[in-house]
Amino acid sequence: MLEVAVARVKAEGLQLDYANIELEDLIRAAGVPRSTVFRIWPDRAAFVADLVRALFEADPGFETGFDDETLGFIEHAVTEGAAAASSPEEQQAALRDVLRAAVAHNMAAVEDTVAWRVYRTMSAALSSGDAVPGGDDIRALLSEIVGRYLDRMAELYRVLNAAFGLRMRSGLDERDLAIAVMATIDGMGDHRRINPVMIDAPRTVSLGVEGPRDWHLAGIAISGIHDAFTERIET
């Protein structure tokens, strides 16, 4: 029955009150015994919790923070771009190019995934103040999923910082950086759904020796956050 529910959410999305996840309806659609379903899931909240786990397990890109194409680009930049830079200024420029391209691509790629849409829907439901079925359990589940996401992102920033000769400023760590970036992306994503052009329209900006480049607004913000949270390792 989980497979039927996953297919439905992929096709319709997840409504704020889970109105499209009714157990009786899913039992009929899946053709499974009612007694078996209620032995496994005594109520809809218990089923929704397992459904959310299944959706995120089917989309590992959410926990990594980037889709496979963006991750491949970042890995290439770390191995090739950082090594080719011969001065601190060139290293900074190479890092900005990584962030510029990765964020622009990933804003569209991740926002369109089922797991991300479910995460935003459930976050909105929990923050609305309305009673949400299984609210405490769902909050705990989302906290667990976000925690794994932050751990993965923190590790990615450790790799990027090491490759480009940077370290975190005193009093901050890579998880703090991951939290700040996540909050920025969440906010940009919310406004992007309301007015895509306001967020997605390219801005031609010169941030360093590389000269003018077309930036996604989220890329400029994240580049600034990264610069504020890190400092160069003096050799």
Image: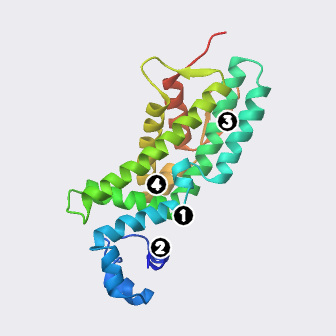
Mark found first going from the N terminus, 4 or 3? 3
Give the distance between the C-alpha atoms of the residues marked 4 and 3, in whole angstroms. Answer: 22 Å
- Checking the image for residue 219, the label placed there is none
Mark closer to the observer (1, 4): 1
Q: Regarding mark 2 in the picture, which secondary structure is present there?
A: helix
Q: Are marks 1 and 2 in contact (CB under 8 Å)?
A: yes
Name the amino acid, label 3: Asp
Crowd class of label 1 (few under 14; some 14 to 19; many from 20; radius 10 Å): few
Mark closer to the observer (4, 3): 3
Pointer 1 residue: 58
Q: Are marks 1 and 3 in contact (CB under 8 Å)?
A: no
- Checking the image for residue 97, the label placed there is 3
Q: Position of residue 91 (x, y in %)?
A: 69, 24
Name the amino acid, label 1: Ala
Pointer 4 residue: 192
Q: How is the protein colored in the picture? A: rainbow
Mark found first going from the N terminus, 4 or 2? 2
Mark closer to the observer (1, 3): 1
Q: Is residue 51 above or below residue 22?
A: above
Mark closer to the observer (3, 2): 2
Which residue corresponds to the image point at 48% horizontal and 37% vertical from the top-left? 178
Asked whether residue 188 is in view, the answer is: yes
Q: Regarding mark 3 in the picture, which secondary structure is present there?
A: helix
Pointer 2 residue: 6
Q: Position of residue 32 (x, y in %)?
A: 41, 87
Name the amino acid, label 4: Arg
Q: Regarding mark 4 in the picture, which secondary structure is present there?
A: helix
Q: Regarding mark 1 in the picture, which secondary structure is present there?
A: loop
Crowd class of label 3 (few under 14; some 14 to 19; many from 20; radius 10 Å): some
Give the distance between the C-alpha atoms of the residues marked 1 and 3, in whole angstroms. Answer: 31 Å
Could you say which quadrant of the image residue 35 lies in? bottom left
